[in-house]
Amino acid sequence: MATTEDRDAVGSAPGSMDAWRKRYEAVPERKDELTSTISGIDVEPLYAAENAAPDDARLGFPGEFPFTRGVYPSMYRGRLWTMRQFAGFGTAEETNVRFRYLLEHGQTGLSTAFDMPTLMGYDSDHARSLGEVGREGVAIDSLADMETLFSGIPLGEVSTSMTINSPAAILLAFYLCVGEQQGVPRQLLRGTIQTDILKEYIAQKEYIFPPEPSMRLVTDMVEFCAKEMPLWHPISISGYHIREAGSTAAQELAFTLADGFTYVEWALARGLDVDDFAPRLSFFFNAHLDFFEEIAKYRAARRIWATVLRDRYGAKSERSLLMRFHTQTAGVSLTAQQPDVNIVRTAIEALAAVLGGTQSLHTNSFDEALALPTEDAVRLALRTQQVIAHETGVVNTIDPLGGSFYLEWLTDELERQAYDYFRRIDELGGVVAAIEQNFFQREIAEASFRYQSEVEAGQRVIVGVNRYRQEDGEIAILKIDPALEQKQIDRVEDVRARRDVAAVEARLAALHDAAGRDDVNLMPLLVDASRDYVTMGEICDTFRDVWGIWRETPVF
C-alpha cells in the first residue's frame, strides 16, 4: 500500500503522465541499441493523448476523405488484397512455367520481372547483353517472346503487373498485341506497368534516355491508356526502389509523391482532365522492418495524395483521390547470413503492409539474398500471405491500429517531413530540376550512410549479421542454365529471319520521325511496330538516335 511519503516522492497524482514519467526516469534505460525508428525519428518511451489525440477530421472513416484509414469502406472485409509473387528468369518458356505454378498454388495476380538487357532496351544478342540474359528476370526481345510468356494464360481473366520503366511503352504494346491475339479487347486488359522513370533517375539508375523525352513517353502512355485502356494502370509510382537505395521512410514517402505530382502536371499540360487519368495512377511502396513506421507511412501517403489532388489539382471525382498501392517486402532487409531468418522478417513486413491497407502484396522469398527464388521458397512466401489473410484475424476489422497515440503521432510526423521535402523540391524548381542538381541522390546517400554506420557500430542490430552470428549450412538455390542465353539469342535471330524486312524498316522510320516531334503520341506507332515483330532493341536504338542517352553526374 502506498504511503504519503511515496506519493510525495512522486510529486504528482497517481495515474498522471507526470507521475509515470518520474517513475520511468528512475529506471536506467538499455544503452546498447538505438530507440529511434530505422529512419532516425526519435521515439518517446510512451505516447498518450497529449502527444497525438486523434483528430476525427484527419482520421476520418475508411473510404472517406482523407482516406487515412483506407481507400475502400469495407477494405478486407469485402475483398482481400491481390497476392502477387514477382516471377521471371531465363527465357519466356521457363517463366511461363513459373507463372502457371504460382496460379495453381493460389496466387491471384501475375507480376513479371525482366532481365537487365530488357530493362536497358537491348536485344539478347547485343554485345552489352553478354552474361546477363535471363539472369535476374525473363528476357523479352519481341512480341514472339511475349506470346510465349503468356501462352495458356487468359489475359481476360488475370491481372498482370510488369516491372519495367524506360522501355515500358514497348512492353505494354507487346502485351496489348498478345491480348488481341487472344481475342481480349484492349479496353478489358487489367494490370499495371511500372513506367516510373523519375525514380530511375533518383534511385534505381535503369534509365536510357534524358528526363525530358522520357517524360514525354510516359505522358504518351498515360494519354493512350486514359482513352484506350481504361482498366490499365499506366504508371506504378514507385517508392520501393527509393527505399532499397537507402532512403528513410519519410524520403520514400516524399520523393514518391513528388514524382506522382510531376506526372499529374505533365498530363495536365498535355491537356488531359485530371479526373480522366488520375484514377488509374497507382503506387508501389516498400515494407521495411520498422513495423509502426511502415504502417504510418502508408496512412500518411493516402492522406497527402487525396488532399493535394483535391486542393492543388482540382480533382472532383472521388476515384481520383484514392491512393491504391502495391507493396513488396524489403529486399534490402534480407540477409545472406542465416537466410531462414528472412522468413520471419518477411512475415513481419507483410503484416505491416496489410495493417497499412495495401491493395496488392508481394512477399520476398527467404533465399533472395543469394539467388532468384526456388519454387519451394516462393511457395512459402505465398503461404505467408495466405496465413496472414486467413489465420491471424487482422482482416476482420478495418484499420485495427487506428487511434493509437503512437501511430497517429508517427503518421503526423511523417506527413510533416514529407511536406517539408515538397517545399525544398519546389524551391529547386521541381522534380526534374532537382534530379539534374542531384538533390535526391545526395539525400538518399546521406541517409544510407547514417544507417550503415549505425549497423557497423552495433547500434542497429541485424540478427545473424552483427549479433547472434553462427555458421550457415548449405541451402539449395536456383541456378540459371548458361545454355538459356544462347537459346534466347537463337530465338531473336530466328524472329528477324522470318519477318517482313520492308515492314520493319517502315515502322522504324515512322518511329524515328515521330520521336522528333511533339505533336504525335508514340503508343499507336509502337503497337504497329510490335505487330510486325520489331524488336525491343531496334525500337530503343531508334529512340537513342533521336533523343540520346542520359549520363548522371556522380555523387560521392
Image (cartoon, rainbow, N blue to C red):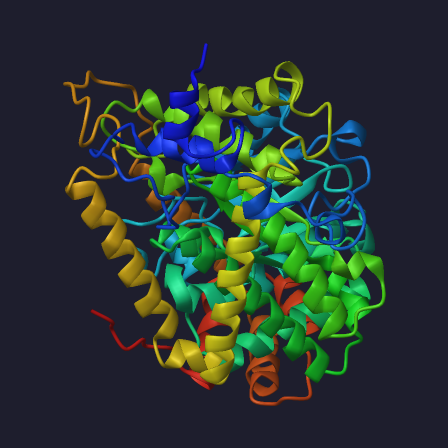
Q: From the image, which quarter does the C terminus lie in? A: bottom left
Q: Quadrant of residue 216?
A: bottom right
**Residue that lies at the very extreme toward the right in this rendered image:** 317
Residue in the image at 82% along x and 55% along y: 187
Spot occupied by residue 423 in the image (x, y as percentages of width and height)? 51, 76
Question: As rendered, which of 429 and 204 lies closer to the eye?
Answer: 429
Name the residue nearer the viewer: 441 or 312.
312
Q: Is residue 382 visible?
A: yes
**In x, y percent, where is residue 346?**
44, 29
Task: Using the image, determine if residue 218 lies above or below residue 8.
Answer: below
Q: Residue at x 32, y 57 (%)?
A: 129
Residue at 63%, 69% (x, y): give it. 526
* Percent of width and height locating residue 247: 37, 56
Choose between 279 and 231: the one closer to the eye.
Answer: 279
Horizontal relation, residue 357 to residue 320: left or right: left
Instruction: Inspect this view and state whether residue 165 appears.
Output: no
Q: Residue at point 68% right, 49% down? A: 324
Picture coordinates of residue 25, whole percent (x, y): 32, 34
| Residue projecting furthest to the front | 4
317 lies above or below 33: below
Relative to residue 106, is residue 86 drawn left or right?
A: left
Q: Say which of 195 and 458 sits in front.
A: 458
